[in-house]
Amino acid sequence: MGIALLPSRLHFMKNNSLREFVLWFWPFTTQQPIQSAVLLAAEGHVPAYVSVHRATTYYLADRRYDMLPSILSADLCSLLGGVDRYAVSVLWELDKTSYEIKKVWYGRTIIRSAYKLFYEAAQELLDGNFSVIDDIPEFRDLDEKSRQAKLEELVWAVRKLTDIARHVRAKRHGALELEGVEVRIQLDEKKNICDLIPKQPLEVHETVAECMILANHWVAKKIWESFPHQALLRQHPPPHQEFFSELRECAKAKGFFIDTRSNKTLADSLDNANDPSDPIVNRLLRSMATHAMSNALYFSTGSCAEEEFHHYGLALDKYTHFTSPIRRYSDIIVHRLLMAAISKDKKMESKENLFSNKDLEELCRHINNRNRAAQRSQKRSTELFQCMYFKDKDQETEDRCISDGVIYSMRTNGVLVFIPRFGIKGAAYLKNKDGLVISCGPDSHSEWKPGSLQRFQNKITSTTTGGESVTFHLFDHVTVRISVQASRCHSDTIRLEIISNKPYMIPDTELFHQSSLLLKSDLVKEVTRSVEEAQLAQEVKVNVIQEDCEKYCQTKGRSLYTLLEEIRDLALLDVSNSHGI
């Protein structure tokens, strides 16, 4: 498969060893490593063909389909604690006090991860909770004196890197911090789902992101300077202003003003649009800003003018993807470009076969298409998973089918609702197909009655012919019943029904977080159990069929039945052929 040729691609560098530095990485608590910036897939061999076809790693609700074979993605190309790994690194020399970049170096290195941390542990260390070191493998066999020395070293490194990341981010004036519904699946050793945890924002997430953004930015500048007409960069065009209209109107309903004239004014406006009594408001506004954005795309620098290189969301003039060659084929191409650029600086003959501008632009279109396909797959996978959870629930008696929802948009015949507990967004109709409108009583029981709807800019009122009325405003918390709408023509969909115009529970950040962890964990376990039961039932059915087949199937070998069949075949033969007629 070409993997046997991998050693010939490696370069042992005695002078570029980073083993003695304090290096660490932050995988999730599943211990799946963050990808290192290493390329081992040899050109012209099976791993390269597979990776260019897939172009990216596919992340579904409960599993992941890697772009590269597991021997690369899970072993040779991954950072493992205390293990030497070949890498392509970007090193900066910073001013001691201002953190301004004085020098930058690119090249092949050998690195060794000193500590095996997960994000939550790094955040605990940053916050001063040192009891978490009991969960760090490198601390378990140390005596107290060594533990204390190692702890001080690690805490200093985490805090210093975080401080540098804060400075780097502050320099990117106009960088947007957007919001998306994202959950993390926990798998056990057998790859079964054991938990589903909503992603909680941590400062260490931003720290790692800033380091990757910084590396990507400097690599983008380097490869463009060396190959101005055939470098692979990533552009993010400014969004159309009309796409922000709903965001501006929703913010106005809460008394906020969103300035969308530039990425900096937008970022500042979103930072100021905070409701202390309801943190969901800012999350929804950032989510709306995300939906208004244009898609970021890969491109060849020979196909665009330099003023079109800009990345709107990150507020950078040049940007690419370099830090994850395990999961993105674009990063593999960028690594080859960087190696060729280094060889060019040293006036050495490059061993990399670079794409022409035309071929690179065609490859970029392919990668962009595969990325869109991966995003659609991830979205549909999440929707399927949610439907599987609610499909077998009795919506009339099951408490988990009732949840708190937040209205974030008005429609002619209903509203759009966001359910934080499950990360669900969907339509809740206030007028059904029969022309009846919703009426919510004091007992939280909803009924459909004759009447009409009157829609305003920030609210919608349902009035029955009997004079009963109920008004729904933007960002109102309502009680929602969740069920599944089955269909024989297409996939099942989540159905939302408002049963009360009052909140299901008082919005509380801590209470919401705890209930999210509990219910999402139960969601995964119940779906997994249902799938296992269905598989078991199928196996039982197959066994029954096999038993019936063995009991009632035709006799194998010589029998009266086979003899009669042979006589019948002889009687049907065309004897004329045997006489040449």
Image (cartoon, rainbow, N blue to C red):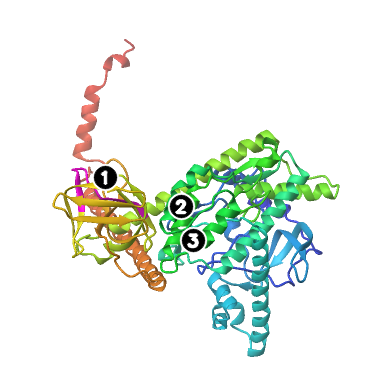
Q: Mark 3 points at which residue?
A: 273
Residue at 41% across, 63% down: 193
Whether pointer 2 and pointer 1 mark residues with C-beta atoms closer than 8 Å, the reply is no
N-terminal-most mark, 3 or 2: 3
Nearest the eye: 319 or 545: 319
Look at the numbered disc 3 and give the secondary structure of its residue.
Answer: loop
- With 549 as the anchor, is 6 left or right in this view? right
Q: Name the residue under label 2.
A: 288
Residue at 23% across, 64% down: 398
Which one is in front in this view, the residue at disc 3 or the one at disc 2? 3
Kind of residue at badge 2 = Met
Question: Label 3 to label 2, Cα distance in Å?
Answer: 13 Å
The location of residue 335, given as percent across then percent down, is: 69, 50
Residue at 20% across, 49% down: 437
In the rendered image, is residue 70 in sight? no
The location of residue 428, given as percent across then percent down, is: 29, 52
**Height in image: 54 above or below 214?**
above
- The part of the chain drawn in magenta is 425-438
Q: Name the residue under label 1.
A: 487
- Does the segment drawn in magenta span residue 469? no
Q: Mark 2, residues whose alpha carbon is within 10 Å: few (<14), some, or many (≥20)?
A: many
In the rendered image, is residue 105 in sight? yes
- With 496 as the anchor, is 564 left or right in this view? left
**Height in image: 290 above or below 83?**
above
Question: Label 1 to label 3, Cα distance in Å?
Answer: 40 Å
Q: Mark 1, residues whose alpha carbon is within 10 Å: few (<14), some, or many (≥20)?
A: few
- With 46 as the anchor, is 557 left or right in this view? left
